Amino acid sequence: MPKTPKVQYSNENLQKAIEAVQDVSNNLSTRQIAEKYGVPRSSLRYHIKNPGHKYSCGPSPTLPVAEERRLKEWIIISASKGFPRNKEDILDTVQKFLVKRFAAFGKIIFDIQIRLSYNFIICVDIDTLLFKFPCHCLVFCIVIIV
C-alpha cells in the first residue's frame, strides 16, 4: 500500500479547532471540527489532552536558550563594531558559559545550535571551519573537539 501523505495544517487552524472543541455552544463533534479546519483528528485530540506540550526533537542543547541568545548578540554586536570574533574567541566564551554553570568541558563533542534565527548556527569540531552560503540564508559552522 502506498504511504498516505501527511496532512499540512497551520498552527492557526489548529488553535481555531481547539477553541471550537472547547466551545460548548456549538454542537459539533471532534471529527466534524477536524474536517472543518483541515486538522487530523488524532492531532487535535492530542493537543487538547496535552495543552502545554512543546515539540523538541534530538538531544537537549548544551547551552540554554538564554545563553545562546547572549552569545549570538555578542558575536553580532562585536562584528558590527568592527571586531569580528574568530574561532578561539567563540570557544573561550562558550567555555566561560559552561564553567559558570559548572558543566563538564571535557572530551565531548559539543553541538551548539543557536535556534533563535534560522540563519545562525554554530556547531563544534577541531579541524574544520566551514562556511556554507545557501541561497536563502547564511550559515556559519564551527566544529571543535575539545
Image (cartoon, rainbow, N blue to C red):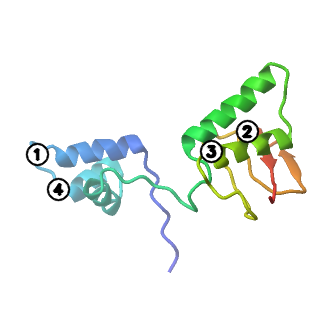
Q: Residue furthest bottom?
A: 1
Measured Cα–Cα span from mark 2 to mark 1: 45 Å
Residue at left offset 85%, top offset 25%: 83
Q: Amino acid at mark 4?
A: Ser
**Which of these two is toward me, 55 or 11?**
55
Decide if residue 67 is on the left or right side of residue 119.
Answer: left
Q: Which residue is mark 4?
A: 29
Q: Amino acid at mark 3?
A: Lys
Q: Nearer the viewer, mark 3 or mark 1?
A: 3
Name the quarter where the C terminus is drawn: bottom right
Residue at left offset 50%, top offset 56%: 56
Circle 1: is it few (<14), some (14-19), or many (20+) Cα within 10 Å? few
Does label 3 or label 2 sit earlier along the sequence?
3
Circle 3: is it few (<14), some (14-19), or many (20+) Cα within 10 Å? few
**Which of these two is toward me, 106 or 42?**
106
Measured Cα–Cα span from mark 3 to mark 2: 36 Å
**Which of these two is toward me, 19 or 98?**
98
Does label 1 or label 4 sit earlier along the sequence?
1
Does label 3 or label 4 sit earlier along the sequence?
4
Label placed on residue 136: 2
